[in-house]
Image (tube, rainbow, N blue to C red):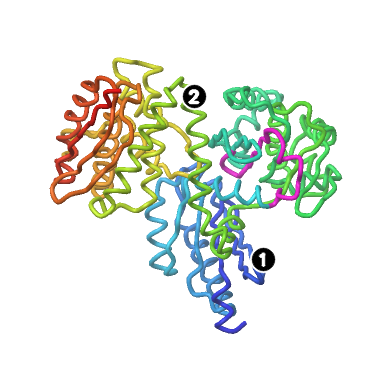
């Protein structure tokens, strides 16, 4: 391959719990064509799930694998692969040290994706793979990705996500966490079933009747083969009766007997065992399904698409925004938030954000933080009206928001909860949770959000025809009203001081009354 062709090529290296994988692909006539795929075995599962940290022996294995991959990439004239990791490094207590050592030894920068970010890439790829399946375009589809260390759940209504959860338990993690119990208990399968029940019973998706079931992830190709599934394009069609029969066949078996029965290794059998318990558990959400759709995919495929495909890359922010907001609005309804008020506050906030772009200097992606904060800022009132701001902060901070990192979720929580009382940490202790640069970002977003929220303090949409003008030392907001606006004026003045402290601009609200 010549150097010119490298422009349309990309390599993604994924550091997993049991192997390091490299996928090399090329964009040819608008389609992604695989060029190479390599795997190198490592054993991070016991390090991370049992010891909680990556051992130096494993670190050396990782470094050796990356060295081999770098050598292989020279043939493709790719010098800077994208190196990602999910559970393998995300849950390691010495993650920062491992990342630093691999940067020093191998010259690579590793991106550790949070669970919600990882699943956003995977679900996006699932939607691509299922684009020819007419069934998933009608009604609600439950998509579940069963990874080695976590489970991602999404309900898709045919257009967008309406429910999302990331559960920190997967086939390999479940095997390692409960491994000691398995060795001691004779009826381990009963214990595992009860454990899965306690986890899955917490998934409140009864408001979304499920018509279709999409399951993929750990051991799905082995399961599809053992079930005699037919493959249509990239998608396995697994009959639910056969999946249940396979589960019944291994339910009370040991890894040794499963391995002998199906001609696989004991390690594969052990993971097949726990994976089947999870897959079977998912069937409860759609008991009437005749088949399960299972397109094999992984995070590297999703990332590759957005590195190479121009339309996919350009559409990624819109994809994240649409799905994260859709899930946020569904969550807000569950907490009985005032949706009309929240949407209005969101409109005011993004107008201010856009008008002030030369002043705030924030990345355009931060606009989404304001929109999510507006959607969710009343959640805390469901718990406590007296301390609704703090309750809002706590609720959002614990959420999985589609496609957002934990740091971005924290930003949403702080802005929505109006936690930042000032620029100094002693005035807002929660600010200490963020790096200094992020503290400034949150202060700017909070100043904008507070002003926007004040403009509909009564929740009665009194202000009409809003116009915002940025002048040398002030932000002038003109509006029209036909009723008393004393509450909005008071709230605006209360928020103006913080805004001025952050931006050095004096916000002014000028209201013209319609006497008709």
Q: Secondary structure at mark 1?
A: strand
**Is residue 464 within the magenta segment?**
no
Q: Position of residue 40 (x, y in %)?
A: 61, 62
Q: Which mark is residue 31?
A: 1
Find the magenta span and give its range. Answer: 129-152
Q: Earlier in the sequence, mark 1 or mark 2?
A: 1
Quarter of the image where the C terminus is located: top left
Q: Position of residue 330 (x, y in %)?
A: 52, 29
Query: Badge 2 local density, few (<14 within 10 Å), some, or many (20+)?
Result: some
Q: Is residue 115 visible?
A: no
Q: Is residue 222 left or right of residue 32?
A: right
Q: Secondary structure at mark 2?
A: helix
Residue drawn at x 29%, y 19% is 387
Q: Position of residue 367 (x, y in %)?
A: 37, 45
Q: Is residue 168 visible?
A: yes
Which residue is under mark 2?
A: 333
Furthest-front residue in this view: 516
Relative to the observer, which residue lies in front, 135 or 16? 135
Residue drawn at x 79%, y 40% is 258
Furthest-bottom residue in this view: 2
């Amino acid at each position: 391959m010549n150097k010119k062709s490298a422009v349309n090529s990309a390599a993604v290296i994924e550091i997993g719990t049991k192997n390091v994988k490299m996928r090399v692909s090329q964009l040819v006539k608008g389609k992604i064509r695989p060029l190479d795929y390599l795997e190198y075995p490592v054993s991070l599962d016991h390090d991370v799930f049992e010891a909680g940290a990556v051992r130096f022996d494993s670190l050396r294995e990782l470094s050796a694998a990356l060295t081999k991959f770098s050598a292989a990439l020279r043939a493709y004239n790719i010098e800077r692969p994208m190196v990602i990791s999910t559970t393998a490094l995300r849950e390691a207590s010495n993650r920062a040290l491992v990342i630093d050592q691999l940067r020093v030894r191998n010259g690579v920068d590793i991106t550790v994706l949070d669970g919600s970010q990882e699943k956003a890439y995977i679900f996006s790829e699932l939607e691509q793979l299922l684009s020819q399946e007419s069934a998933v375009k009608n009604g609600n589809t439950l998509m579940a990705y069963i990874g080695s260390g976590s489970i991602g759940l999404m309900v898709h209504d045919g257009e967008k996500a309406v429910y999302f959860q990331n559960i920190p338990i997967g086939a390999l993690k479940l095997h390692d966490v409960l491994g000691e119990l398995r060795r001691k208990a004779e009826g381990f399968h009963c214990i595992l079933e009860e454990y899965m029940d306690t986890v899955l019973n917490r998934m409140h998706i009864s408001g979304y009747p499920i018509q279709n079931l999409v399951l993929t992830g750990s051991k799905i190709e082995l399961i599809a083969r053992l079930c005699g599934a037919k493959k249509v394009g990239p998608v396995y069609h697994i009959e639910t009766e056969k999946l249940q029969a396979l589960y019944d066949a291994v339910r009370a078996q040991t890894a040794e007997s499963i391995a002998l029965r199906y001609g696989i290794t004991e390690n594969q059998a052990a993971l097949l065992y726990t994976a089947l318990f999870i897959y079977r558990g998912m069937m409860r959400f759609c008991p009437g399904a005749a088949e399960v759709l299972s397109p094999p995919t992984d995070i590297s495929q999703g990332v590759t698409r957005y590195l190479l495909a121009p339309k996919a890359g350009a559409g990624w922010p819109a994809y994240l925004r649409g799905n994260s907001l859709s899930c946020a609005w569904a969550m807000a309804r569950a907490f009985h938030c005032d949706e009309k008020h929240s949407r209005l506050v969101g409109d005011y906030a993004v107008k201010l954000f856009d008008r002030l772009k030369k002043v705030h200097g924030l990345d355009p992606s931060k606009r989404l933080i304001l929109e999510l904060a507006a959607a969710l800022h009343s959640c805390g009132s469901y718990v406590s009206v007296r301390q609704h701001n703090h309750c809002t902060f706590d609720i959002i901070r614990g959420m999985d928001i589609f496609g957002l990192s934990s740091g971005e979720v924290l930003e949403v929580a702080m802005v929505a909860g109006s936690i930042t009382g000032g620029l100094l940490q002693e005035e807002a202790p929660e600010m200490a949770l963020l790096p200094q640069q992020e503290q400034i970002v949150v202060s700017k977003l909070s100043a904008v959000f507070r002003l926007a929220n004040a403009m509909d303090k009564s929740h009665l949409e009194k202000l009409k025809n809003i116009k915002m003008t940025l002048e040398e030392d002030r932000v002038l907001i003109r509006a029209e009203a036909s009723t008393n606006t004393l509450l909005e004026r008071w709230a605006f003045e209360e928020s103006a001081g913080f805004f001025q402290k952050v931006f050095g601009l004096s916000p002014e609200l000028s209201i013209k009354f319609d006497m008709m």
